[in-house]
Image (spheres, helix red, strand yellow):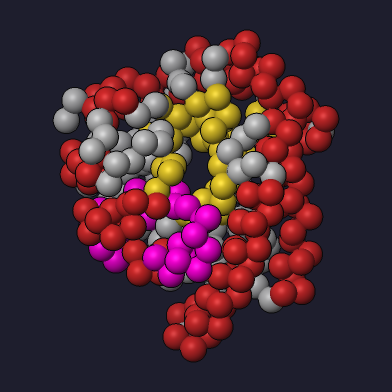
Amino acid sequence: MTDRKQWKTGLSIGRASEESLQHAADAGLDLVEISCIQDDDPANWALVPEWEKKTGVKVWSIHLPFGRGAYRPDDTDENWESFLPVHKALIDGGGVAGIKHMVIHASGEDVELRSPETREVRFQRALRHLSDLSDYCKAHGSTLCVEVLPRFCIGNCSDEIQRIMEYNPDIRLCFDVNHLLKESHTEFVKKVGKYAVTTHISDYDFVDEKHWFPMEGNIDWNEVQTALEQADYTGPFLYEVAFTGHVWEDVKPNHEKLKTL
């Protein structure tokens, strides 16, 4: 059983640069998740270790692209192949920088996914494509982390996450705690918490994702942390929040308060 007091504090910040890592350091953060590199210049990936050394902040993960109509593992082989160069460029860059975790969504949210027959076809595509990308990550020194998603996206419950994890044992879980709409946090973690290596931390109303600051919604944070402790979770509490009324400097004190619950 792990101890919540040992979990490091992280934040999803978008673009990596020496300035953004210094801002994170000034805010008291231990690590960050990014989605791109400064100036979109591949040469800058080699500078990340230097930025980390100067600031003391680790780049923990890269969130691979997602969005409507693009970058979806459940899409056709032809479309997926057209997305791959963007994914692989980030994974390659992460390999140069020494970044170990690549976060990905298993699907978009097309209305067709509501049909059980179509959903299964697209689920099978997602399994194949995620597995292939996981193998690519492994060859470049990182781990593919599939994020639990809300509503009718693929990977919206523990049963679907379990299927993905079992298809390729190298794939791991990004536990976004404001995405659960079909089961409780305790139920989810009991089933698949052993696969979790990273998190997205925010709060919500149990109706839909909100990305509120923790303790501004309905999550029982002691319940979540206890479940993760019992699952021997050793990754960070990595905040992915909408900064309405908050700044980066609010993250560390919020996490320290959660640890006392």
Q: Nearer the viewer, residue 13 or 93?
A: 93
Q: How many marks?
A: 0
Q: Residue at x 53, y 55 (%)?
A: 170
Residue 49 appears in the picture as rendered: yes
Q: Left or right of 76: which side holds 193? A: left
Q: Nearer the viewer, residue 80 or 46?
A: 46
Residue 60 placement (x, y as % from top left): 54, 33
Residue 111 appears in the picture as rendered: no
Residue 198 placement (x, y as % from top left): 44, 42
Q: Residue at x 64, y 67 (%)?
A: 129
Q: Reply above or below: 186 against 253.
A: below
Residue 187 placement (x, y as % from top left): 22, 59
Q: Reply above or below: 201 against 67.
A: above
Residue 166 in magenta stretch: yes
Q: Quadrant of the N terminus?
A: top left
Q: Left or right of 156: which side holds 216? A: left
Q: Residue at x 21, y 53 (%)?
A: 186
Q: Left or right of 46: which side holds 239? A: left
Q: Left or right of 195: which side holds 88? A: right
Q: Reply above or below: 42 against 6.
A: below
Q: Reply above or below: 169 against 259.
A: below
Residue 206 placement (x, y as % from top left): 27, 56
Which quadrant of the figure has residue 43?
A: top right
Which quadrant of the figure has residue 161?
A: bottom left
Residue 18 in magenta stretch: no
Q: Residue at x 40, y 27 (%)?
A: 9
Q: Nearer the viewer, residue 138 or 23?
A: 138
Residue interval drawn in magenta? 162-185
Q: Quadrant of the C terminus?
A: top left
